[in-house]
Image: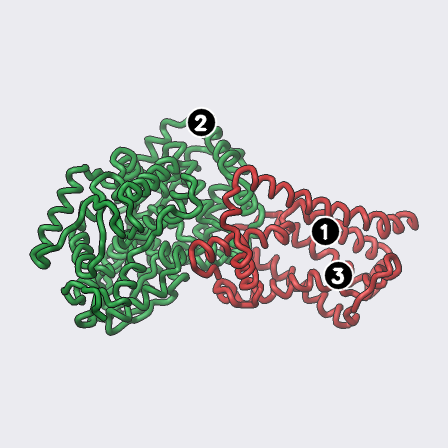
Chain colours: A green, B red
C-alpha cells in the first residue's frame, strides 16, 4: 500500500489484480480469443457499428463530455474516442489476434473507466454512440469469461435467483411482511398487498432494498397507503427490476430478467408498473431488456418513481405538511435525465418539497455521471480507489453547490455519491425523493374529493 | 500533352463524377442491406421529426453544448465545410467551364471574394493539421492518414489558387488542380470523406433515440 502513494493513477489502475479477470485470462488460448472477438464483431454488430467506426473523424469533441477524462486532468487516453481506439480499433486492426495483456486493459477500460452514461453521444457532432461501443467490448469480455469478479457475481445471482443479491424467495416475503408490520404502527390499516390480482400498479424495486435498505420499502408503503393507491408487490421472482447482466454484456440473462419482470406483471393483470428510484433498472426494463426479447417498447406502461411521486404531489394525493428546510441540490441521474427526460419533473418536485434549491452545473441532460453507474461501482472493492480518482470532477461539481443535502433519485448514484462525499470530505447528506417526501408529507389518508 | 489535358478535363471529369455517384449509391445501398439483415429494429425507432430536429440543432452554429466548449475549432470547421461546397460550385472559372460544356450556369462569386475564401480554406486546413499535433487529446487519436487526407483536401484549393494567379508553371499547376480535384471526388465514397453521407444517418438515429425514446435533447 505504501507504494501506491508515489504512483500515478494510471499505473495504480493498471496494476489492480481482479480475480475474475485473472482466472478468466488463464483459461484463454489465442484461438479462443480471436474466434470470440471475430464472432462478436462480425456476427453481432451491424451497419450502426460499422458506421460509427468509419465516421469518427478523430475531432476530439467527445473528450469534454467525459467526466472521467476531466477528472484525470484531461489525459488523452481517457477520452471516449480514445477508449474506443484502445479497444475496438486495435481488435479490428489485429483481426482479433490480441494478447492477454491487451485484454486485461480492455476490461479495465470498458468496465471501470466508462460509465456508459451516454454524455459523449451528446457531444459528438455525428451522434456516435461510444457507450454502445464500450458495451460491445464488454460483450466480448463476457464471452471470453473475463468479466470483473464482483459484477459477475451479481449476474450469477440474477441467473440463479432472478435477483441481484441472492435473496431467497422466503427472505423476500419475510422482508415485506416485516416492513408492513413496522408501518402498521403508523397506519393501522396499511398493507403491502402481495400478488393482488388486477391492481392498478405493480411496484418493483431493486434487490439491494430488501437486503440493505428495507426502510425504503416501508417509506413507499406509507406513501402508497396515504395516497390511496391500488397497488401490489409480487411475491415471486421477477420482483427485482435491476439488471446487472445488461452491463456485463450477458444479453441472454439480461433478456430473461426483463421477461421475468413483464411476466410477473402480466400474471397479476396490473395496469402499469411503477419502479423505485433506480436508474439502470429503469433503463433495462424500458429500452434494453425489452428489445432483446422482441418488444420495441415495453409491453407495460412503465413509470419511474420520479414521475409517480410528481403525479401524487401535483394531484394533491400526497400533501406537504411543511417544506424541507435544509438547502438541497439535485443530481440528475443519467438514466433518468438524458435517459428518460424526467429532469424537469424532478425539479418541479424539488420545488414542491423544499424551500431552498441550489442547482448544480452542468445539470439536466448535461449532468456529469455519478461515477458509480454503468456497472462500475458493481465491480467492487478492487476498483474503488480508481473510481474515486475518476470522480474528482463530480466531487468538485458537488462542492460548488455548497448545499447541505444532495437528492439522488437512483440507487447506484446514491451509493457512488456517498462514496464521493466520504472520500472527498464533502459535508453533504444523501437523500432519495422518497426520503424527503416521507419526512415532509401529511400522514393522512387521501380521500376522494380532497382537493 | 494536348490530348492528355483534353482527357483529364473531359472524359475523366465524367468518369470521376460517375465513380463518385456510383460509389456513394453502392455504399449507401450496402449500408441499408446490412441494416435490413441484422438491425431492422432501427426502423422502429427512426423518426423523421426527431432525426430532423437533431440534424437542424447540430447545423445551428454554437447551439450544441460541445461546440461552445471549443468555439474556435467549431467556428473554423463550420465555415470550412460551407466553403468546401460553396467555392467549387460558385466559382466563376468552374461555372464558365460548365456553361461551355453543359450550358448550365448560375450566380458566381467575385474573383476577389473567392480568393479570400480560398485562403481561409487553406488556413483552416493548416489549423486542423497543427491542432492534430498540439492538442493532446486530438494527437492521441490522430493517425498518419489523417494528415494525408488533410493534404488531399488542401491540394485542389492550393493548386486552384496558384492556377488562378498564374504563379509558377501554370500548365502543370492546372493539371495538378484538375487531377487533385478529381482524386478527391473519387475518394469520397471509399474513405472517411464519406462521413458527409454517414453523418446525417448517425445523427438522425441518435436524435430519434434521444427524442423519441428518451424524451431528451441530444445537443
Are dots 2 and 1 in contact, CB under 8 Å? Answer: no
Identify the element where label 2 is drawn: helix
Disc on res. A402: none
Sequence-wise, the earlier of marks 3 and 1 is: 3
Q: CA distance from mark 3 to mark 2?
A: 52 Å
Q: Are marks 3 and 2 on the same chain?
A: no
* Residue sitting at x 22%, y 44%: A234
Q: Chain of mark 1?
A: B
Placement of A312 over or under A167, stated as above or below: below
Q: Which sits in the foreground, A197 or A190? A: A197
Number of numbered discs overlaid on the protein picture: 3
Q: Is residue A137 visible?
A: yes
Residue that numbered label 2 is attached to: A32
Residue B181 at what x, y percent from top left?
Answer: 76, 54
Placement of A382 over or under A122, stated as above or below: above
Report crowding for label 3: few under 14, some 14 to 19, many 20 or more residues within 10 A (C-alpha). Answer: some
Q: CA distance from mark 3 to mark 1?
A: 12 Å
Placement of A91 over or under B75, stated as above or below: above
* Residue sitting at x 41%, y 61%: A365
Report crowding for label 2: few under 14, some 14 to 19, many 20 or more residues within 10 A (C-alpha). Answer: some
Are dots 3 and 2 in contact, CB under 8 Å? Answer: no
Q: Is residue B140 visible?
A: no
Residue that numbered label 1 is attached to: B184
Q: Which sits in the foreground, A387 or A309? A: A309
Answer with left or right where residue A389 lies relative to residue A444. Answer: right
Give residue A335's quadrant in the image: bottom left
Disc on res. B88: 3
Amino acid at each position: 500500500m505504501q507504494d501506491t502513494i508515489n504512483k500515478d493513477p494510471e499505473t495504480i489502475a493498471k496494476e489492480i489484480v481482479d480475480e475474475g479477470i485473472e482466472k478468466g485470462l488463464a483459461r484463454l488460448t489465442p484461438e479462443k480469443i480471436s474466434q470470440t472477438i471475430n464472432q462478436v464483431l462480425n456476427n453481432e454488430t451491424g451497419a450502426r457499428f460499422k458506421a460509427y467506426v468509419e465516421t469518427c473523424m478523430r475531432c476530439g469533441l467527445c473528450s469534454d463530455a467525459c467526466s472521467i477524462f476531466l477528472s484525470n486532468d484531461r489525459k488523452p487516453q481517457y477520452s471516449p474516442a480514445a477508449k474506443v481506439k484502445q479497444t475496438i480499433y486495435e481488435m479490428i486492426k489485429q483481426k482479433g489476434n490480441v494478447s492477454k495483456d491487451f485484454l486485461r486493459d480492455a476490461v479495465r477500460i470498458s468496465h471501470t473507466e466508462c460509465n456508459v452514461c451516454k454524455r459523449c453521444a451528446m457531444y459528438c457532432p455525428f451522434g456516435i454512440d461510444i457507450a454502445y461501443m464500450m458495451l460491445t467490448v464488454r460483450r466480448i469480455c463476457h464471452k471470453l469469461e473475463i468479466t470483473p469478479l464482483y459484477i459477475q457475481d451479481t449476474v450469477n445471482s440474477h441467473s440463479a435467483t432472478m435477483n441481484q443479491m441472492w435473496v431467497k424467495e422466503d427472505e423476500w416475503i419475510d422482508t415485506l411482511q416485516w416492513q408492513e408490520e413496522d408501518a402498521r404502527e403508523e397506519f393501522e390499516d396499511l398493507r403491502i398487498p402481495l400478488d393482488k390480482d388486477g391492481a392498478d400498479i405493480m411496484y418493483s424495486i431493486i434487490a439491494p432494498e430488501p437486503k440493505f435498505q428495507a426502510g425504503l420499502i416501508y417509506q413507499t408503503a406509507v406513501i402508497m397507503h396515504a395516497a390511496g393507491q391500488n397497488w401490489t408487490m409480487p411475491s415471486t421472482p421477477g420482483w427485482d427490476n435491476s439488471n446487472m447482466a445488461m452491463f456485463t454484456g450477458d444479453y441472454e440473462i439480461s433478456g430473461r430478467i426483463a421477461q421475468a419482470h413483464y411476466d410477473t406483471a402480466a400474471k397479476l393483470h396490473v395496469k402499469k408498473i411503477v419502479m423505485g428510484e433506480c436508474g439502470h433498472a429503469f433503463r433495462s426494463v424500458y429500452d434494453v431488456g425489452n428489445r432483446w426479447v422482441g418488444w420495441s417498447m415495453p409491453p407495460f406502461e412503465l413509470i419511474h418513481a420520479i414521475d409517480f411521486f410528481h403525479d401524487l404531489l401535483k394531484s394533491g394525493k400526497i400533501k406537504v405538511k411543511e417544506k424541507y428546510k435544509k438547502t438541497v441540490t439535485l443530481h440528475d441521474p443519467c438514466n433518468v435525465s438524458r435517459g428518460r427526460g424526467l429532469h424537469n419533473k424532478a425539479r418541479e418536485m424539488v420545488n414542491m418539497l423544499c424551500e431552498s434549491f441550489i442547482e448544480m452545473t452542468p445539470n439536466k441532460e448535461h449532468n456529469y455521471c455519478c461515477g458509480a453507474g454503468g456497472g462500475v461501482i458493481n465491480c467492487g472493492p478492487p476498483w474503488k480507489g480508481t473510481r474515486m480518482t475518476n470522480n474528482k470532477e463530480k466531487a468538485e461539481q458537488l462542492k460548488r453547490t455548497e448545499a447541505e443535502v444532495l437528492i439522488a433519485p437512483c440507487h447506484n448514484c446514491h451509493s457512488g455519491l456517498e462514496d464521493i462525499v466520504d472520500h472527498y470530505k464533502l459535508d453533504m447528506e444523501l437523500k432519495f425523493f422518497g426520503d424527503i417526501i416521507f419526512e415532509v408529507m401529511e400522514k393522512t389518508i387521501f380521500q376522494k374529493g380532497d382537493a | 500533352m494536348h490530348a492528355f489535358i483534353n482527357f483529364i478535363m473531359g472524359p475523366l471529369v465524367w468518369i470521376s463524377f460517375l465513380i463518385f455517384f456510383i460509389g456513394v449509391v453502392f455504399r449507401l445501398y450496402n449500408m441499408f442491406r446490412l441494416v435490413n439483415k441484422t438491425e431492422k429494429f432501427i426502423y422502429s425507432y427512426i423518426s423523421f421529426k426527431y432525426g430532423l430536429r437533431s440534424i437542424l440543432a447540430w447545423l445551428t452554429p454554437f447551439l450544441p453544448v460541445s461546440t461552445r466548449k471549443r468555439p474556435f475549432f467549431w467556428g473554423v470547421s463550420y465555415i470550412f465545410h460551407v466553403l468546401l461546397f460553396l467555392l467549387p460550385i460558385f466559382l466563376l472559372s468552374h461555372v464558365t467551364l460548365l456553361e461551355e460544356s453543359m450550358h448550365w450556369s448560375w450566380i458566381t462569386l467575385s474573383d476577389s471574394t473567392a480568393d479570400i475564401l480560398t485562403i481561409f480554406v487553406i488556413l483552416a486546413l493548416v489549423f486542423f493539421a497543427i491542432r492534430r499535433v498540439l492538442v493532446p487529446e486530438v494527437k492521441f487519436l490522430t493517425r498518419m492518414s489523417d494528415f494525408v487526407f488533410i493534404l488531399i483536401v488542401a491540394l485542389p484549393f492550393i493548386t486552384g489558387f496558384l492556377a488562378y494567379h498564374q504563379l509558377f508553371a501554370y500548365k502543370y499547376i492546372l493539371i495538378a488542380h484538375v487531377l487533385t480535384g478529381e482524386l478527391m471526388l473519387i475518394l469520397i465514397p471509399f474513405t472517411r470523406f464519406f462521413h458527409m453521407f454517414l453523418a446525417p444517418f448517425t445523427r438522425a438515429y441518435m436524435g430519434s433515440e434521444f427524442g423519441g425514446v428518451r424524451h431528451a435533447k441530444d445537443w
